[in-house]
Amino acid sequence: MGAEQKTISEAHLRVLAEDITAPMDVPSFTRSTVDGYAVRASDTFGAEENRPVALRICGCVSVGETPSIIVERGKAAEIVTGAPMPKGADAVVMLEYAVQKGEEVLVSRSVSMGENVMEAGSDIRKGATVLKESQILSSREIGVLAALGLTEVNVYKRPRVAVISTGPEIVKPGKALPPGKVYDINMFTLSAAVRECGGEPVELGIVPDDREQLKAAFERALNLADVVITSGGVSVGPKDVIPQVLNELGEPGVIVCGMATKPGKPTTIAIIDGKPVFSLPGHPTSALLMFHLFVHSMICLMAGKREEAPFAVRAVAGARMFAARGRRTFVMVNLNRDKSGKWLASPVPLGLSGAITTLAKAEGFVEISEDRQFIDAGDEVEVHLFKPKD
């Protein structure tokens, strides 16, 4: 999608479009890491609690100032955490091991050269590559950019993804729910999934199963966004006209119309003048699974985001899992430990159309190939996880 420049505040959770090379040392000066006294380490050798070494105080160093004093042999300077080290000093005695008496400080513990001191460049060296292209800029990486004095950074543009819900039975949450209607789930689950991939959802609301209204909605979506996702309207009913409408909008049109999968059989994919359109089933769990299988990777790539390796664990089937004849079947499961400590994969029923509990309960899915009738209880299976399992 190309890159754009953003302030480091705006760049939070964006994907870095360039390597970041440090333009300076961090810290840029040698500083104390404790409150105490800046000294020459050799002056403290032999210091003990019952035989302290007396050093003459030659001044005080505070944070944010350039020290003008020089610590000569036999002298010490008061210093606070984060303050720059004065010339001549090469270590700091912690406050706990020093007692000030008049113009002198009694040191009861020796220090070695560099003790309690952070050298310039010890955190980040000038010229070092500190952040890599394709990294996601979390709060930690934003802190690194700020430490380097940077105010702007190049990040990948986020693909705009239009999200449309279709059907006469769905109602926007917050409105009164008439008999026979259900609240729109897919608009919110799919938009959230787009954000998780690094995309920017453009929510275009609910469109009835009317050819002209659908066509107008698609034209608007294709004008506003780089990708279009719809849910519902792709089955075999008389009002499921989305595949017909897509073929009227541009070339090459529909390239996939139905899949040999369960769930997700009616999933339709089109390319309209270079822009992909994914028309997913209306069943919330089916829609989100098809997004996970077919849309997730593409949006990650468009956003410049490194896709993480799929999360999977070996488990034992907790019950018999049946496959649909001739279709690759995805069985939603949750995981628990059995008495021996192995993962036990228990099927989560898809339920009736519109059931939402599967989305909350399922932690992953088991894939059954087209040529297999079932997986028996006790068989070893691979569970593909929606997110890492603790």
Image (cartoon, grey):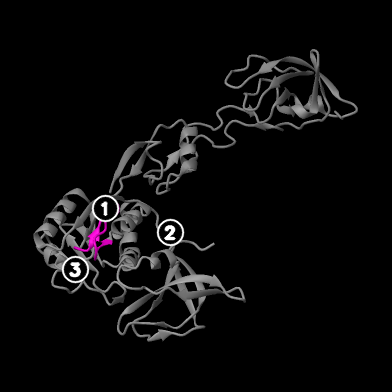
Q: Is residue 230 visible?
A: no
Residue 95: give x, y in percent of width and height.
75, 27
- Numbered badge on residue 175: 1
Magenta-drawn stretch, dominant element (helix, strand or loop) = loop
In space, the residues marked 3 and 1 are separated at their CA atoms by 37 Å
Q: Which of the 4 image quarters holds residue 138?
A: top left
Please say whether residue 171 is one of the residues in the magenta stretch: yes
Q: In this image, 315 relative to 219: left or right?
A: right
Camera-side mark, 2 or 1: 1
The residue under label 3 is which amino acid type?
Ile
Please say whether residue 370 is one of the residues in the magenta stretch: no
In space, the residues marked 3 and 2 are separated at their CA atoms by 28 Å
Q: Are marks 2 and 1 in contact (CB under 8 Å)?
A: no
The residue under label 2 is which amino acid type?
Glu
Residue 260: give x, y in percent of width and height.
27, 77
Q: Say which residue label 2 marks.
A: 308
Q: Is residue 375 above or below residue 181?
A: below
Residue situated in front as seen by the camera: 258 or 172: 172
Residue 133: give x, y in percent of width and height.
40, 47
Q: In this image, 57 relative to 188: left or right?
A: right
N-term mark: 3 or 1: 1
At x 79%, y 25%, the residue is 98
Q: Are marks 3 and 2 in contact (CB under 8 Å)?
A: no
Q: Say which residue label 3 marks.
A: 255
Characterize the local packing of mark 2: few (<14), some (14-19) or many (20 or more) Cα atoms within 10 angstroms.
Answer: few
N-term mark: 2 or 1: 1
Q: Is residue 205 visible?
A: yes
Residue situated in front as seen by the camera: 149 or 165: 165
Q: Which of the 4 image quarters holds residue 330?
A: bottom left
Characterize the local packing of mark 3: few (<14), some (14-19) or many (20 or more) Cα atoms within 10 angstroms.
Answer: few
